[in-house]
Image (cartoon, rainbow, N blue to C red):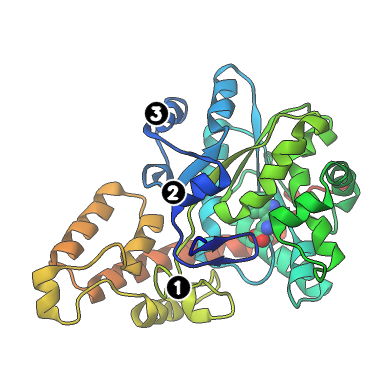
């Protein structure tokens, strides 16, 4: 038995990403694929060069088609179970980059149904959270002409038709084996996977032809895409492709669980500058040494240091990041200093994000898909 678990409902243990590639049957994003991507996008997003997005299925196929003049579309999503935190932005920011580089349509699914079925939340709460989260998503600066957001319970008229076609082709036995449903799972959640697979085939339903889908998402969502690929031919579409990210670490440590119910483990997009500073100073797990003397002599362990690890996600400038890493791991920099750098970086981001979020609230309808 492997010592770690990665499912859409639970991530636990120390994740070995190479083993996950084997377990899920995906492919590593290798140097050749990165170079191929660079030819099309001119520069590479730091999440690619830093292997935050590390695994894929059929990304090569998507790029080949694109080189031959055939467009694809992007699909990603968000489960509105609470307010959003910094980690939730990782796949979204990368998706935005892909959209800008390839100039393609993007569909964003908000699964209020999923969170109603899986969490102790009322439909009113999941609905409110859906629109709260949508404001954060829009605030990232997506292009309203190419970005289409929908909330499952509202867009059901269109989605349901696709979902039942998907569901007809997946047996209960497969569904149980993939998602681990048991006789005591509620029957709503056992149908839900068809709702999350449905957008892989949405443009076809909308009369836009059988474009290929590319899903950027954290690798815990992979369970949905394997059966989606199996039914694609029956849906009259190419198999949806994926590009998978690693998980964003908790503030409390690389192996700690990121939990929305523990406010110490994450920085929320609505946190104040004082809260951010306090959380980083108090809780960001340090890979530095116990005393200043030891730190000066031995330097920090960057692999374990959350401030450094978070900078890998939020400092785009490679040279700056390298300088910080060099100084900190050699002992020239102390933990208090890197924490200050991180808190300032996060606060600079949040200041403009919160402003953009305020403006986004009035622009929601520009993005919504309605039926
Ligand atoms: N199930 C995802 C969550 O809980 C939300 C989601 C729906 C999603 N469709 C998606 C995520 C497509 C990534 C890609 O957050």
Kindly state the secondary structure of the residue where label 2 is placed: helix
170 vs 314, nearest the viewer = 170
Question: Which mark sits nearer the N-terminus, 2 or 1?
Answer: 2
Find the distance from the CA under tag 3 to the CA under tag 1: 34 Å
- Say which quarter of the image contains residue 165: top right
Residue at label 2?
Answer: 18
Residues under numbered marks 2 and 3 in contact, where contact means CB atoms less than 8 Å apart: no
- The yes-or-no answer for disc 2 within 8 Å of ligand 1 is no
Q: Earlier in the sequence, mark 3 or mark 1?
A: 3
| Whether residue 263 can be seen here | yes
Residue at the image position 67 percent from the left and 45 percent from the top: 225
Q: Which residue is mark 1?
A: 256
Tell me if residue 93 comes above or below residue 232 in the rendering.
below
Question: Where residue 76 appears, x then y in whole percent?
Answer: 65, 48
Q: Position of residue 66 (x, y in %)?
A: 58, 23
> In the drawing, does residue 253 fall left or right of residue 128?
left
Q: Report the residue marked by disc 3.
A: 32
């Amino acid at each position: 038995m492997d010592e770690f678990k990665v499912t859409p409902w639970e991530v636990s243990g120390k994740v070995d990403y190479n083993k996950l590639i084997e377990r899920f049957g995906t492919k590593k994003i290798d140097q050749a694929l990165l170079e191929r991507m660079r030819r099309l996008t001119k520069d590479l997003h730091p999440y690619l060069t830093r292997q935050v997005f590390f695994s894929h299925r059929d990304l090569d196929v998507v790029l080949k088609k694109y080189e031959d003049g055939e467009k694809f579309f992007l699909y990603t999503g968000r489960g509105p179970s609470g307010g959003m935190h910094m980690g939730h932005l990782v796949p979204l920011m990368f998706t935005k980059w892909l959209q800008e580089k390839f100039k393609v349509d993007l569909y964003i699914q908000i699964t209020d149904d999923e969170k109603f079925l899986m969490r102790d939340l009322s439909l009113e709460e999941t609905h409110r959270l859906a629109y709260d989260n949508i404001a954060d998503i829009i605030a990232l600066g997506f292009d309203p002409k190419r970005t289409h957001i929908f909330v499952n319970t509202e867009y059901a008229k269109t989605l349901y038709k696709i979902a039942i076609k998907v569901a007809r082709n997946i047996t209960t036995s497969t569904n149980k084996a993939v998602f681990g449903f048991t006789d005591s799972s509620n029957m709503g959640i056992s149908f839900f996977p068809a709702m999350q697979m449905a957008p892989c085939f949405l443009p076809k339903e909308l009369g836009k032809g059988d474009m290929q889908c590319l899903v950027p998402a954290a690798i815990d969502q992979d369970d949905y895409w394997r059966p989606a690929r199996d039914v694609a031919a029956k849906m009259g579409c190419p198999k949806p492709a994926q590009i998978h990210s690693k998980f964003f670490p908790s503030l409390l440590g690389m192996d700690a669980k990121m939990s929305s119910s523990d406010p110490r483990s994450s920085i929320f997009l609505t946190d104040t500058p004082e809260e951010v500073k306090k959380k980083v100073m108090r809780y960001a797990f340090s890979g530095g040494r116990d005393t200043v003397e030891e730190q000066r002599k031995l330097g920090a362990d960057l692999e374990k240091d959350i401030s450094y690890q978070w900078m890998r996600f939020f400092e785009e400038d490679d040279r700056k990041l390298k300088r910080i890493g060099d100084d900190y791991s050699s002992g020239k920099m102390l933990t208090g200093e890197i924490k200050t750098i991180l808190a300032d970086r996060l606060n600079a981001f949040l200041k403009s994000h919160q402003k953009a979020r305020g403006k986004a609230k009035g622009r929601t309808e520009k993005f919504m898909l309605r039926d």
